[in-house]
Amino acid sequence: MLSPLILIQILWTSLATSSCFVLFALAFALVLKVNRIFNFAQAAVMTTAFYAAYTVVGLASGPGWAGLLAGVAGAVAMSAVLELFGFRALRRRQASSMFVFIFTLIVSELISYVAMLIYGTWPATIFPSLFWPVTLVGTIAVSQWDLMALGGTAVVLAATFAFLRWSRTGQSMTAVADNPDLAEFYGIARDRVFLAAMLLSGLIAGFSMFLYGTRAQVQPGSAIELLLFAVAATIIGGIGNLAGAVVAAFVLAIIQNGSVLFIPSEWQGFLLYAFLFLAIVLFPRGVRLPQRKRLVRRTPAPALGPAES
Amino acid sequence: MPGHPDARRSFALTRRAALGGLGMIGVGGLARGARAEQEPLRFGLAMPLTGGQATYGQDQVRAAQWGLDAVNAADGVNGRKLAAIVLDTQADAQTGIQAVNRLVSVEKVPVFVTAWSEVVKAVAPIANDGKIVELSVGANSPEIARLGDYVYTTFPLADVDITAVAEYSATKLGKKRAAVLYINNETGITAAQVYRDTFTKAGGQIVAYEAYDPKATDWTGQILKVRLATPDIIHIQGLVADTPQLIAQLRQLGLTQPISSYSAVYNPKLIQQLGAAANGVIATSLAPGTEDSPAVKAYVERWQKEVGRPPNGLPYTQYLYDAPFLVAAVLKSLDSAKKPITGENFRAEMLGIRSFDLPLTGKLVINPNHTVKKPVYLMEVKNGAWSELAVVS
């Protein structure tokens, strides 16, 4: 049963299919880190992205790149609306974080219903065909979608972390995430940073939802379910830890897929919630690898008294 | 000839006969008119008009309304109009209970039509306590046959088509080793068991039996286990949202065996989504299609003409279209026998008639064990199109 070829196939396919979830988790973790919002309205952003792309490609028979642009533009626009007319207004009214959280839940359901009224409940895909050509590498099946998804995800991850590390806006996001009041004291406009984080999150969510919708069928309520995985990965990866969320999403997907080789398949769905439960109970700050001890040069304390002769 | 006395007599007789005939027609017409002007006979129609399932529910109500119009255009119930009281269930148990309570307590209908397994189950005690007939039209949980004396279905329950496809695979297609992939929820678990038991009983062997999570989007682990088991045929018991993607992944991972499933995958979209990978997929249909019946063809053309699209869930709407015909047939029989129209009498009369010829779904036989007997149409994708493989009676 456990031949290396089977393990390699599972590893490869899990890596590819988890790529969308990795980006969902990154988008969610970013807003949680910078804006400090459990943004379940990301499901609304994802729904908007999918149906914008579906309208252009699936309904209007436009090219794929136009669908990608429409999806990303839709997601970014929805994120901007959420920040400018939702979160910003709630901040000004000093709404509690619980109130903001409930607001995000309502928005996700609202957009789901709007999508249902416009597009119906029948599952849809961005391209008419779900089937992607496959190449055998040895005996490992590698589909074109796998390559596109992994390549796209690698580019988005690299660009996001580079943006956060080296761009002025990215550094401002890190500063606001660490201490919003201190950041404002140093002249960083918090509202602009919050908006930038929402837009970046929307861009990532829009791209990943486009990827997802080119492989799987989507219904108006699908995004809410997809987001649960992102939330689990964010919590397990450690709140405020973007790289942790990314790694957790990859690992969770691989464990879930590979688990059926070791346990009855009926238990597969249970695993995610079991991990989440254990992570919250045992690692409330996220699962962190032990840090290497820093080398500290010990220097003798200077003598405070007069030197003895 | 007009000048001949006999001819005159003949004319007079003819005129008298004609006047008498006209009088009779007039009296009959007046009587019929009086019946038509009577308060219409009513039945309940509790369906999801809002909420997540409204897309299907609204189309089904439209189909039932068209069926009702056709019944009334053809003399109604012995000249009396038939009307439906339509209430919203949102496909939700609580809302369904409110709607059916109103139908039973306020509207006092002898029979009501409803659908969606959750609602059908939730309102069954109301039907049984009130001795009102509940007709489930579209829900397919096998439990429906065990919900009580007043709950009947006009739609074949899940085990009918799964049994047919399992038996056909083992006996007619000669498949000896089957793998089963099923969604781990109410839809998949029971039906997968039915397939497993039937296939085994028919002499086959189940070589892999794998569940998958309802939220799954990747099935690599299960598929590789199936691949190792080297089955002759793979049966998928999933949902319309995940089955096409699962089939795509099976084909991508090199499994070329025939794949069977059930009515959920029988739609043209599957071929569009999978292209050549759809070849060899076998599905079931519980109602005749446009190729089988001119009436169904005309019905689908009417949808295109009046609504601009085919109905969501065509077979289900066919059953809803036929529901008023069944209700009218029972009421006609009661009316002819001059029996009071009550739920108890409706039930007794319906079971007495048992067999109904319905316009869009064909012959329906209601069994005493609360199931129905209907032919199962096995459809197969060949050369990029659905074609009829067999009809299992």
Image (tube, rainbow, N blue to C red):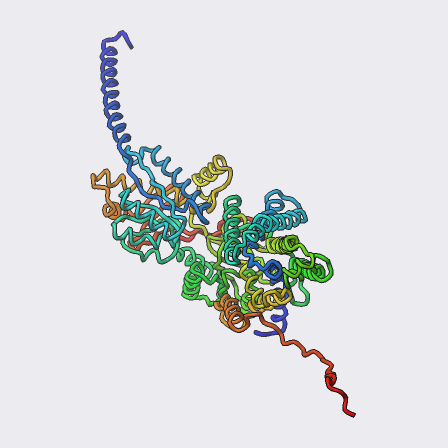
Residue most extreme to the bottom: A309
With B393 as the anchor, is B251 left or right in this view?
right
Residue most extreme to the front: A306
Q: Is residue B276 visible?
A: no
With B10 as the anchor, is B233 left or right in this view?
right
The quarter in which the N terminus of chain A is drawn is bottom right
Q: How many numbered dots are placed on residues in this image?
A: 0
* Image coords of residue B287 (percent x, y): 42, 47
* Image coords of residue A131 (percent x, y): 61, 55
Residue most extreme to the right: A309
* Image coords of residue B302 (percent x, y): 46, 36
The quadrant where residue B250 appears:
bottom right
The quarter in which the C terminus of chain A is drawn is bottom right
The quadrant where residue B189 appears:
bottom left
The front one of A25 and B77 is A25
Depicted B114 relative to depicted B231: above or below? above
Q: Is residue A251 visible?
A: yes
State the residue at coordinates (42%, 55%).
Answer: B161
The front one of A38 and B280 is A38
The front one of B172 and A100 is A100
* Image coords of residue A76 (percent x, y): 63, 50
Depicted B246 relative to depicted A277: above or below? above
